[in-house]
Image (cartoon, rainbow, N blue to C red):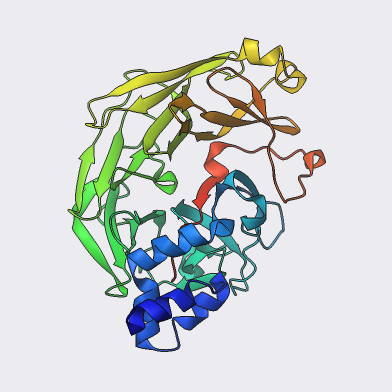
Amino acid sequence: MNNNDVMSDILLRLPLKDLVGCKCVCKWWNTLISDPIFKLNYSLRNPQYNISGFFLQKFLYLELHSKLLFFPCEGRVDAAPKPSLSFIEDDKGVCIKHSCNGLLICSSFRCGEEDRKYYICKPTTKQYFPLPNLECRTVFGISIAYDPNRSPHYKIVSICDLYLSKNHRQIKIYSPVTGSWKPSGKPFTVPDEDMLFNRGVFWNGSLHWIGMGNLALRFDPETELMLTMPMPPTQRKPGYFGESGGHLLLVEAYGPLTAGFDIMEMKADYSGWFVKYHLNLDQVARQCQAIERANRLSILHIVHNHVEDVDESFIVIHVPGEFVSFKLRDYSFMDLQTNNHVDSGLGLWYSWEGVYPYTNTFFYL
């Protein structure tokens, strides 16, 4: 064994917080710990850090911080990050703006855009880093593009206003390599219909946005190309839009979701959507009084999961006063584990637009 092998073997035995601190000791240790093979070996040796689930965020009147819950979906419940952003020091409070593969984009909470600060953070290690000012009047959306299987580096993509007109937008990209924002491509225009730039979804190496109409966009941060993508040819309201297990999923709401709905998946070549699951909630309601008596419901999260060729995918929904989860294959119910105190008496209403998926990838800021 050479010196690198010996030192790597020692570092593999350290707790995660101590390991992160070792990166600052010397360049040699930093190089060893940052190596992709070391990260993989550390993850395999320390399954207690493996967790995936989702943050659920709600804004409460006069509260400085947003209200957060965390629901584990896979892994160990005791490895779940604490549902708090108080480790980020900002006297205006902090809220989540986007999540991607273990990283969060957060921002100042109760302030105008001119005073707002943005942060990249990792809640399991309580690391955060302030981003440079964007120097624009309005930020319509800010998203992380990060795939640890392709690159150890992340990029941050923002959609900003432009002085040309109210419909013009400018993409700006932040890279930790340069430590600065740069404009990407020429300004582009969007129609008056609402585009959900604040709900970007990272899939297949690109960020995706849908709107309240028929326009949908995708942006590749490596090639810096913005393209359109097809949407189902009907007028609708998005009931859910997200990624799970390498699949881009969409639910359209033509009316109340209480009767049932289709979960659609985008084809890998972007040629169109197909129905992945059709949910008949009448069958589910026979087994769940909360759904049976509900006059409304919202989809929070869909997990695409296969175990030894068996479809174990499931959905999490919110009905008044209760969170419910069941498998898409046979509608069997699942227990939602959480280390939070869930106060159903507050009368809070949650939707997919307040959900931020989180996977504890082995990454340091």
Q: What residue is at 58 percent from the left and 25 percent from the top? A: 327
User: Percent position (x, y) of residue 311?
Assistant: 48, 25
Q: Is residue 65 visible?
A: yes
Q: Is residue 187 left or right of residue 90?
A: left
Q: Closest to the observer: 344 or 340?
A: 340
Q: Is residue 173 left or right of residue 323?
A: left
User: Percent position (x, y) of residue 275?
Assistant: 39, 18
Question: Which quadrant does the N terminus fall into?
Answer: bottom left
Q: Residue furthest front?
A: 1
Q: Is residue 189 left or right of residue 67?
A: left
Q: What residue is at 46 percent from the left and 19 percent from the top? A: 277
In the depicted structure, whether residue 33 falls above or below residue 111? below
User: Percent position (x, y) of residue 361?
Assistant: 46, 57
Q: What residue is at 60 percent from the left and 75 percent from the top? A: 89
Q: Closest to the observer: 58 or 139?
A: 58
Q: Is residue 304 visible?
A: no
Q: What residue is at 54 percent from the left and 74 percent from the top? A: 14
Q: Residue furthest bottom?
A: 26
User: Percent position (x, y) of residue 66?
Assistant: 64, 56
Query: Based on the displayed image, in which of its 4 quarters is residue 90 positioned?
Result: bottom right
Question: Which quadrant does the C terminus fall into?
Answer: bottom left
